[in-house]
Image: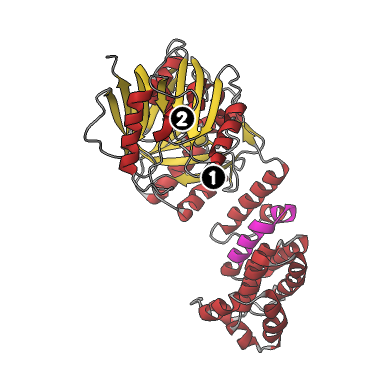
């Protein structure tokens, strides 16, 4: 067994050998295996510690580009290093092994080492490695009283439980589960800033008569609802204009870090939160934790998740494809804790079989369709149809006789056709034609006074270069003035300032909208009747 009295293990690492690792990392496996590994094995104990970067480099190279045969060669060598007298070499080996798909043999040796090591640092590294490769044997060890080291082994237990649950029964969001505990429960519908009034109007149109929900607040990018009757997520997904839905589990007000962690854990693991999750989750409850607007908060996430696991071991923090995200949002006083289902793919977008790089944000497309308002026997044209989101969202609202999608890309048009067919809108005539906006009179069924609605999200020049964006928008307005029937509408996000409108068009409304990092004006024009 490794000697507990390892002087090297008592010195703090100062990341020596960075340059050596950089050089070794660039070598192919064959050179590492046939030259550097034998050289490492022949070296004296002190030289081996100096060249420990070989262990790390081999693990990275094999994990990123190694063949199965190369993995089979490297794994036994790394496993032998778990018995090296140097704690540092052992630590490098236990970090490398999980990258190669370590199994029960490696797990057994690490557990043996866990029982015999006398240093908390090595115990932490063992805990991290076992969290990646451990199974039932690791759980047994955790639950029979292995001495923890700064909470690492508690994290190991949670990670192993989450991974085993993910493999056996990954769990899923139950869209039809009924939330019955509605007293004081708030629901946050979040989306792009500037679209919240459209979201609120959709809520009122959909649920106003039944009084299923009440609108409590409308703020930038947020519509807050109160539930007035038991509901399911499927009920909320009748709404198409919001981006994400969060059930507010509670709030925290503490400013002290330790107290804040306690409050967050208490909210997440509260009996009410557990009952909501039980109603809306199938299988093991797995969640990831996210602090909105704060970037990566790994230390805070770890501390909160550890405390939640202590309070309620049924709730497993797992950032790998968890069905739920618990998001901590800053609020006017403290923070709100929201339970957000992971809806990927979004069931509302059942028709989205294909996409293009510059496709519209789906809730924006839905908002634009609603903003256009109704028109019986509507004829809709999208001159930059892309993947056809705007046309489909407008057709789903009803009253549409024909949609016309044009684009310069044959690939985009093929995707549009596939998506439209998948939307099951058989009563709507659909035409997808390659063509230029400026030459619209050459496109079948297009000409002066033929269209009741132009609904489009033109290219903004951010992902696809536009030589003259201002000129393109001016052309869109000019064509709309001709192609629209009197009273017809043009709805689009406008990225440029227009000095003079065509005389036939009247600007009816404009709203500043966040289009994903930049502001744009979402504008509605009507063609004058006379």
Q: Is residue 222 on the magenta stretch?
A: no
Instruction: Say whether disc 1 or disc 2 marks the residue closer to the N-terminus.
Output: 1
Q: Could you tell me residue 315's position as x and y percent?
A: 59, 41
Q: Residue at image x 51%, y 32%?
A: 388
For label 2, the residue is 442
Q: Main secondary structure of the magenta part?
A: helix
Residue 288 — which label? 1
Question: Which corner quadrant of the image does residue 34 belong to?
Answer: bottom right
Tell me the SS state at disc 2. helix
Q: Residues within 10 Å of mark 1 (few under 14, many from 20)?
A: some
Residue at 64% across, 79% down? 86
**Residue positioned 75% across, 63% down in the render:** 108
Find the magenta span and give its range. 123-139
Q: Is residue 62 depicted above or below 434 in this figure?
A: below
Question: Which residue is nearer to you in this view: 144 or 95?
Answer: 95
Q: Is residue 170 left or right of residue 332?
A: right
Q: Identify the residue at image location x=38%, y=19%.
A: 449
Is 193 situated above or below 35? above
Residue 156 seen in the figure: yes
Q: Nearer the viewer, mark 1 or mark 2?
A: 2
Helix, strand or loop status at disc 1: strand
Badge number at residue 112 = none
Seen from the viewer's position, the closer of residues 247 and 112 is 247
Task: From this view, report whether residue 49 is shown above or below residue 358.
Answer: below
State how far apart marks 1 and 2 are (Cα). 53 Å
Which image quadrant for residue 47? bottom right
Q: How is the image coloured?
A: secondary structure
Residue 322 horizontal/vertical position (percent): 59, 42
Q: In front here: 517 or 456?
A: 456
Which quarter of the figure is the C terminus placed in? top left
Which of the pair 509/296 is nearer the observer?
Answer: 509
């Amino acid at each position: 067994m490794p000697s507990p009295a390892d002087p090297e293990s008592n010195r703090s690492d100062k990341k020596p050998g960075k340059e050596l690792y950089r050089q070794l990392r660039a070598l192919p496996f064959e050179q590492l295996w046939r030259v550097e590994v034998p050289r490492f094995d022949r070296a004296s104990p002190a030289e081996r510690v100096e060249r420990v970067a070989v262990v790390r480099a081999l693990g990275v190279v094999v994990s990123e580009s190694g063949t199965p045969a190369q993995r089979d060669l490297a794994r036994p060598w790394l496993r032998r290093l778990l018995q090296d007298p140097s704690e540092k070499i052992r630590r490098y080996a236990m970090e490398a092994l999980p990258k190669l798909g370590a199994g029960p043999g490696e797990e057994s040796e690490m557990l043996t080492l866990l029982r015999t090591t006398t240093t908390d640092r090595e115990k932490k590294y063992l805990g991290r490695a076992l969290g990646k490769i451990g199974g039932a044997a690791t759980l047994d060890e955790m639950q029979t009283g292995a001495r923890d080291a700064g909470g690492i082994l508690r994290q190991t237990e949670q990670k192993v439980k989450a991974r085993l649950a993910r493999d056996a029964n990954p769990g899923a969001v139950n869209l039809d589960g009924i939330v019955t505990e509605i007293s004081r429960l708030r629901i946050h519908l979040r989306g792009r800033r500037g679209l919240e009034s459209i979201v609120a109007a959709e809520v009122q149109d959909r649920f106003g008569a039944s009084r299923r929900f009440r609108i409590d607040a409308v703020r930038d990018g947020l519509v807050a609802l109160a539930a007035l009757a038991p509901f399911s997520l499927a009920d909320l997904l009748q709404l198409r204009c919001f981006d994400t839905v969060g059930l507010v589990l509670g709030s925290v007000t503490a400013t002290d870090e330790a107290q804040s962690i306690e409050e967050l854990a208490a909210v997440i693991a509260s009996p009410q939160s557990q009952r909501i999750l039980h109603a809306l989750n199938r299988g093991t409850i797995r969640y990831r934790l996210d602090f909105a607007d704060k970037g990566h908060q790994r230390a805070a996430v770890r501390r909160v998740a550890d405390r939640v696991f202590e309070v309620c071991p049924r709730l497993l923090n797992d950032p790998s494809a968890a069905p739920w995200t618990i998001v901590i949002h800053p609020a006017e006083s403290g923070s709100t804790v929201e339970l957000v289902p992971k809806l990927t793919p979004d069931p509302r977008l059942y028709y989205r079989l294909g996409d293009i790089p510059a496709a519209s944000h789906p809730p924006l497309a839905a908002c634009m369709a609603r903003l256009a308002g109704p028109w019986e026997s509507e004829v809709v044209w999208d001159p930059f149809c892309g993947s056809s989101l705007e046309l489909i969202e407008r057709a789903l609202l009803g009253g549409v006789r024909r949609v016309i999608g044009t684009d310069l890309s044959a690939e985009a048009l093929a995707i549009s056709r596939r998506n439209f067919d998948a939307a099951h809108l058989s009563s709507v005539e659909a035409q997808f034609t390659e063509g230029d906006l400026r030459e619209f009179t050459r496109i079948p069924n297009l000409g002066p006074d033929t269209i009741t609605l132009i609904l489009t999200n033109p290219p903004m020049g951010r992902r696809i270069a536009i030589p003259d964006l201002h000129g393109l928008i001016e052309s869109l307005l000019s064509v709309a003035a001709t192609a629209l029937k009197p009273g017809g509408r043009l709805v689009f996000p406008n990225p440029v300032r227009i000095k003079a409108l065509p005389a036939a068009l009247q600007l009816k409304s404009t709203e500043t909208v966040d289009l994903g990092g930049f502001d744009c004006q979402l504008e509605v024009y009507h063609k004058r009747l006379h």
